[in-house]
Image (cartoon, coloured by chain):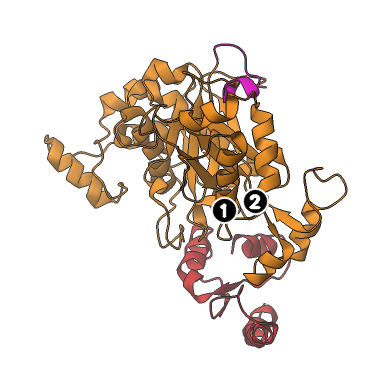
Chain colours: A red, B orange
Amino acid sequence: MHDGISFEQLGKRAVVVCTEPFEVTVKNIARMLGLPDYPFVMVEHPIGSRTMPEIEALAEIAYDQALPILMEG
Amino acid sequence: MASQQARIHEVEDDPLAAIDYCYEQGWTDGLPVVPPDVARVEAMLLFEGRPPETVLAAHPATGFECTVHAAAVNAVMAGCKPEYFPVVVAAFEAMNEPDFNFHGSTASTGGSAPLLVVSGPVIDDIGMNADVNLFGPGNRANATIGRAVRLILMNVFRMIPGVSDKSTQGNPGKFSFCIAERARGNPWPLLVEELDYPMGVSSVTVFAGGGFCNVENHGGNTPEMVLGSIADAMANYGCITLGQSVVVLSPEHVRVVASTGWSKQQVREFLFNRAARTVEGMRSVGKYRQREFDKQHADGASPLVEADKMHRGLSPDDILVVMGGGDAGGHSCFIPSWSRGRSSIMQSKPIGVCIDCD
């Protein structure tokens, strides 16, 4: 989240992706950095132990969530 | 983000009520704290020459800063005597080095705790324990210095369990994880001497530790036997990574190893070479990563790296070896790293003095 907000502050569009157990952490960082409503993408946990087809399926979900965030300015 | 402003909290004139007040404010690690009354905080500050508003460390992700004053308040709450405070200060100066990565190591699911290894004359000066029951409990300095580190992480840097500290299981060292290197009967140069600090200076080394692994070996009577069992612990599939290691050898094990003339460097080299798994074995548990293999086997790799193996760490220099514990018992320990690679590198600082400062 910190990296995503840093990019935004530098004028670069960014989208943050986290897994569900980190929702509270990501929101906490956004609040501390002064952007409590900063949108982000959330997918199922975990990532590391998934097969490539499973990862590709998660990426599709993330893409669908990310697109409006990136397009809506 | 600015440092949190110090302010006075008024409570009724009753120590138990003050302890309860600290609980209500969320200032504890679950155990009662010493209420940080003004006189105790001021006594703590007398052991640090810099102004109270001096920033000791800054959190890169949130911008929170820890001032000397905030550290002193938390040291009081942890139960520190004022003379312990320079160790706490030096520990945070070490953790503030970028290569330590104290945000990652304190926020991660890995459950890391900063292990403090203190070396030098300060150990006797303030009554730290380097001897029997090294990792505690029972010694006020060891227990409260380590606890102060945790309270500062929680209260100043707001590393709150479940919110900003996402440790999956944590580890008991997250209450306190502070030891002293034993000088008595130690045949090798002390850690502070290896750091090449001036005579009379003490040091604290901070390592993002991922737990504690006891290594029992009462039958081994050669260096290879004793160190072979430690290397096996270092290479267990649950722990083996490219991360650094801390090995605390018991005096009984040190006597076996050093009696044949082995130096500490030889110990490190033996452990690095033997703390290894085959590529096939790493694949069998899903922990083989080509990029890690390539990093370990790149040009300039340690000559002790074997072609078909993954070793723990990158070289013998990634293994900190100190002696500690009581005279009796074939029990050493290995402290695995939180970092699975180079995400956190242990850091050392002199205690109470400034060497090569600007």
> Where residue B10 sits in the image (x, y, percent)?
20, 38
Identify the disc placed on residue B343. 2
- Judged left or right of residue B173, residue B104 is right
Image mark 2: chain: B
Q: Is residue A45 magenta?
A: no
> Where residue B59 sits in the image (x, y, percent)?
54, 46
At 56% across and 20% down in the image, what residue appears?
A: B187
- Judged left or right of residue A57, residue A18 is left
Rendered-image quadrant of the C terminus of chain B: top right
In the depicted structure, whether residue B286 falls above or below residue B238: below
> Where residue A65 sits in the image (x, y, percent)?
62, 84
> Disc 1 marks which residue?
B104
Q: Are marks 1 and 2 on the same chain?
A: yes
Q: Closer to the camera, A10 or B153?
A: B153
Asked if the residue under mark 2 is in contact with the one under mark 1, i.e. CB atoms within 8 Å, the reply is yes
Q: Closer to the camera, B185 or B32?
A: B185
Choose mark 1 or mark 2, whichever is in front: 2
